[in-house]
Amino acid sequence: MPHLGRGRGWARWSRRLLLLLLALLVLALLGAWLILRASLPQLEGTHHAPLLSAPVTVARDGDGVPLISGANRLDLAYATGFVHGQERFFQMDLLRRSAAGELAELFGPRALPLDRAHRLHRFRARAAAALQRMTPAERGFVERYVAGVNAGLDTLGARPFEYLLNGAAPRPWTAADSLLVVWAMYLDLQGNQPSRELARGWLAQHLDPAQRAFLLPEGSRWDAPLDAPALALATVPIPATAPAWWGRKDAVPARQVAGIGFTDAVGSNNYALAGSRTASGAAIVSDDMHLGLQLPNIWYRLALRFPDEGGVPRRLVGVSLPGAPPLVIVGSNGRVAWAFTNSYADTLDLVRLQKDPAHAGQVRTPSGWEAPAEHVETILVKGQAAERLVVRETSLGPIREAGGALYAVHWVAHSPDALNLNHLRLERAATLDEALDAAAADGIPAQNIVIGDARGNIGWTVAGALPRRAQGGTVVSFPLAAEGAVPTWDGFLAPGEHPRVVNPPGGQLVTANSRQLDGPAAAVLGDAGFDLGARTRQLRDHLAQLGPRTDVAAAFGAVLDDRALYVAEWRRRALAALDDAAVAGHPQRLAFRRLLQTSWDGRASVGSVGYRLAQQFRWSLHDLLFAGVNAEMKTLDPKATMLAATTRWSDVVARLLDERPAAWLPDGYASWHAVELAAVDRTIMEVTSGGVPLAQATWGRKNTAAIAHPFTMALPFLARWLGAPPDALPGDANMPRVAGPRFGQSERLTVSPGREEEGLFDMPGGQSGHPLSPFFLKGHEDWVQGKAKPLLPGKTVYTLTFSR
């Protein structure tokens, strides 16, 4: 009996201990939840702000979109900073740290490679110098925003939840940080130009002139320039011999295939319809900028209401970039509306430098020998000692090494002209001409901008600094062709020298990252990696079919066009290759042919197997023909590939398949038909990897959204709480509805200036990246489905008042 009592006592204490542990776990979870709740932004009530000249209100609708109303633009800058600081501070922190090369301070040694690459540009030092050049009014505008950011951060009940996970403390925002966010966009939009320069330079040294003209065409039959009905291209003959690296089979491992990784996904779409084409008589402007997709979304929606200098009520609506100076990046001011796409103007050269023992410590530039200035950069690293990096800088830019050679990075982003606040002039513009003048003087990465005004006028130019290229400019340059190559630009075009197209006869303007111009002005822009042009052409033709009385809803729908007009050609080629002899005794090939025929609706639909097979067939041909050159070029730079050198590679492949020259037949193949069948077999191997039956290899299975908070890359289990649903997405590259797992339409906006109530908008992710926010993923499903919502904020649900 005593033993039984002791057993019962032990069981009783075990239960008590278990209950205690459960209670502690519940308390811990409750405490974590309370801390997370405390890091949510203030949506209602009053905030005391002595800097303001008059009260400001932030009226949010049910999606969290604010209408910020106040007495002047300066007061609204403070309130914008406050809401950015409360809702997006960690996102802002990542942007400033990325530009400055300071990510390792948060994430440790794994961020060092990126930090080293970005420290080369010394953007933090450049930001400090840029602030000194600003007028007192401009600097005051940025500093008022900074004050709002820090007030918003300090007012939170707990630091943003990301810092709780990371164990770090947020560092206060500064005016220099806001400029760094703009430089982060330079890196995002122009940061691949060095890889392109290295790739094209390598090819220049390993191709004869005939091969170079064929493999690196200056344009594409798909291009749809603004100043001509079609691009006038001379047919370049296929050279008599292929380069030595062509089609090397030893460079194509059996299971290492490019697949469809959306490596050719560039962005974005924008277009304007003149009043002669619209039901209202006002212009319609539309924009969807294609960027990497994360949570929260890069853009923050808002509307601003205030009286201008003359006391006239004004309203701005569109998107802002959290962290950057508090401007409406894309949107409408009631009189003009504007929209951006990346221009791919050539804004960077790599200039080969010479060394000589007789000139110790010096390098030779095209202007002669010089001693580079040395700047010591200290990179703080979480969990270990700081790293010391010495940046050497010439008169042409900082020095980087590639393939054992030294190059000066001669980049517009390093110039004082790279950044300014002239975007404020665009916000105030009342006419198309005023807006075009303001855009050309804007201090941003060079962008195609289309503008429409309330009177129905439309125009295009390139906003941002454009280099003045020597002898009128060159479309193609090869900086590695000779040591000491002279840079192709010196100084910048005056705003009035930027090319323009105004009120074209067809009543529409379309840009989508392909070559914009066919005339002499094309040389002014150069070519830093234009897209193929199929997307531009499809969008242009779609809009032309809308008729003369188009409304905003019809214009919005153009960016949802997922017709597979470009990939249809590759489907046709695959079907032609799969003749009866090719499929005899090959059941997988037979199934491939049947699926191309039956599981194809002419679109990049989520349920289409045929679309995926046709697209992958194209990429399999890329692997078979270009793997050799890619392996060679990657020794210079991981991103130096044939795709970096030219997006027109598939035009080259199409010519070869049409003309079937024996001299270009890759080793190991008896015919070009055999190459095509090898690409089919490679496609089957790719899409059935992991045991997926061919008939179930749908496009949606491949094109599944993986939009999540950056923390999920290190902590994947958090994706359940910090990620968007894994939706199958229609759309692809080379069509207006660009969609990839982590890349795509970061917003969709369509508006007529002066008629903003009719404007339409959607974007992924919602306004907030906080998982407990009522705005987390709000509206995301609409974006997935392509369902537009009103551009202006809806009925007020929350009101926050700023008092003096």
Image: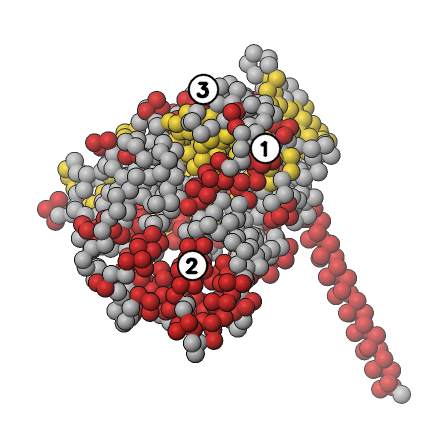
Say above or below: 429 vs 241. above
Eye-nearest disc, 2 or 1: 2
Q: Are marks 3 and 2 in contact (CB under 8 Å)?
A: no
Residue at screen point 48% across, 35% down: 544
Label 2 – label 1 distance at C-alpha:
35 Å
Q: Is residue 520 above or below residue 100?
A: above
Q: Nearer the viewer, residue 761 or 122?
A: 761
The reply to whether residue 338 is in sight is no
Residue bearing the label numbered 3: 434
Which residue is at the far right? 1
Crowd band around label 1 with a 10 angstrom C-alpha radius: few (<14), some (14–19), many (20+): many
> Circle 2: is it few (<14), some (14-19), or many (20+) Cα within 10 Å?
few
> Which residue in the protein does label 1 denote?
552
What amino acid is at disc 1? Val
- The quarter holding residue 40 reads top right
Looking at the image, residue 778 sits to the left or right of residue 501; the answer is right
Q: Position of residue 135 (x, y in %)?
A: 43, 21
The disc at residue 572 is: 2
Q: Where is residue 699? Give x, y as percent.
A: 53, 59
For label 2, the SS is helix
Under mark 2, the amino acid is: Arg
- Say which residue appears at 42% left-offset and 27% top-offset: 504
- Quadrant of the rendered structure where residue 716 is? bottom right
Position in image of residue 144 (x %, y %)? 54, 26
Considering every residue shown, the one lying at the far left of the view is 358
Name the secondary structure under disc 3. Answer: helix
